[in-house]
Amino acid sequence: MYLSKFFVSFILLLQLSINSIAVQWNNENNDFKNKTELSLVELKPFKSTSLTSYKTLDRRQGKRNATEDDDFEFLISGGYRPESNPLSKFLVSIRTTKEQMSFGDNHYCGGSIISRKAILTVAHCIVFPSGKVRNPESILIVAGTPRRLLRTENTQVMAVDEVIPHPDFSQINNILKNDVGIMKLKHKLKLDEEFVDIVPLADTEPKTGTKCTVLGWGDVFRKGPMPDEVLNGDVNILAEWECKYQGISKGGICAGNRDSETDSREGDSGGPMICNNKQVGIVSGGGESKSYDPSIYSDVYYYRKWIAQNGANYISRSIYKLMLLLLAIIKLAINT
């Protein structure tokens, strides 16, 4: 009798799940056909400020052949602006919904694109120091522009549907543990090969000595201004003991540059550290840029299962939850 009840329950549950997945599949197809992948967030007209009073039309339009320096030339602790920056297509700017004076001055963290509807960042970018999780409606994601203060035809401004910090994230005495988080977008990003693309994630453990590149719009010096154009910095993965004064915890990577003192700073948090064209780390804790002070990055490979589970699309998560439920039913039937 119990066995027959089990099979009846199994068939009903399977049919319900298939119907739910089919509805979601149809909705996603309709969204694609209707080209509703871009955010419907209404933007204010761009306002020029003294920091963005560029001297040529090329610079105002954000063209690639514009190489003239900005009004200040500070680079983030050994950082640089490459003539061509193919890695910037993986980077997004995380912003509050309220601009202070002009487009882009509400940037506070970075992130990377891991799917058309998922952004990878660190937990401390979506959780207040008090422990309260940020309201998704208070956050915007801006993709497709290496220029923080300039909106172009390639810029995509996306509304956030859900924020997911790691459940075991904590910050005690400035030591961050399980500092990883994901934001799900309300609409899909429109991908291309030049301005917006999905970053490949690390599939092996990070190795000491590997050369990597970190990207971001972080402060050019402590408590200083943020640059307009995204900066790159070359770092090497170091031994964990070299970050012992920063309080590195399990799941963290120590990285820096002994020669140029390259360092990630406030505003870079959540941005990617890319090694051999794959994202290996996420900017978690920056150094102080005093003599030699490496930074801490969350280890993408270490958190790969959590990232895959929480960054998956709705259909994949539905199947995953269905399998867990079916296993529970089978276990109950066997025990009965």
Image (cartoon, rainbow, N blue to C red):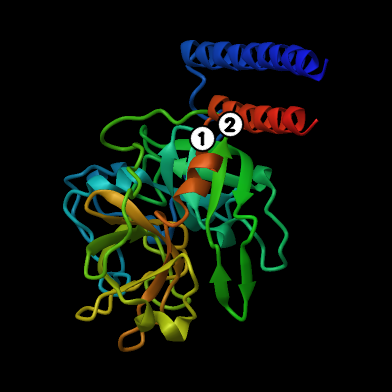
The image shows residue 7, relative to residue 45, as above or below, that is above
Residue 150 shows in the view: yes
- Residue 334: x and y, percent? 73, 30
- Residue 51: x and y, percent? 39, 61
Identify the residue position indicated by label 2 in the image. Answer: 320
State the quadrant of the N terminus: top right
Q: Amino acid at mark 2?
A: Tyr
Which of the two marks, 2 or 1, is nearer to us in this view?
2
Q: Amino acid at mark 1?
A: Ala
Identify the residue position indicated by label 1 in the image. Answer: 312
Picture quadrant where residue 324 is located: top right
253 vs 216, nearest the viewer? 253
CA gap between label 2 and label 1 equals: 10 Å
State the quadrant of the C terminus: top right
Identify the residue shown where x is 60% and y is 55%.
Answer: 166
The image shows residue 267, relative to residue 48, as above or below, that is below
Tag 2 and tag 1, C-beta contact below 8 Å: yes
21 vs 224, nearest the viewer? 21
Left or right of 17, for residue 146: left
Q: Going from the N terminus, do you reach mark 2 or mark 1 first? A: 1
Identify the residue shown where x is 57% and y is 58%.
Answer: 123
Circle 1: is it few (<14), some (14-19), or many (20+) Cα within 10 Å? some
Instruction: Name the secondary structure under disc 1.
Output: loop
Left or right of 279, for residue 133: right
Identify the residue shown where x is 22% and y is 70%.
Answer: 209
Instruction: Name the secondary structure under disc 2.
Output: helix
The image shows residue 49, relative to residue 163, as above or below, that is below
265 vs 151, nearest the viewer? 265
- Residue 83: x and y, percent? 16, 52
Residue 103 shows in the view: no
Circle 2: is it few (<14), some (14-19), or many (20+) Cα within 10 Å? few
Q: Determine the residue located farthest toward the bottom in the rendered image.
A: 291
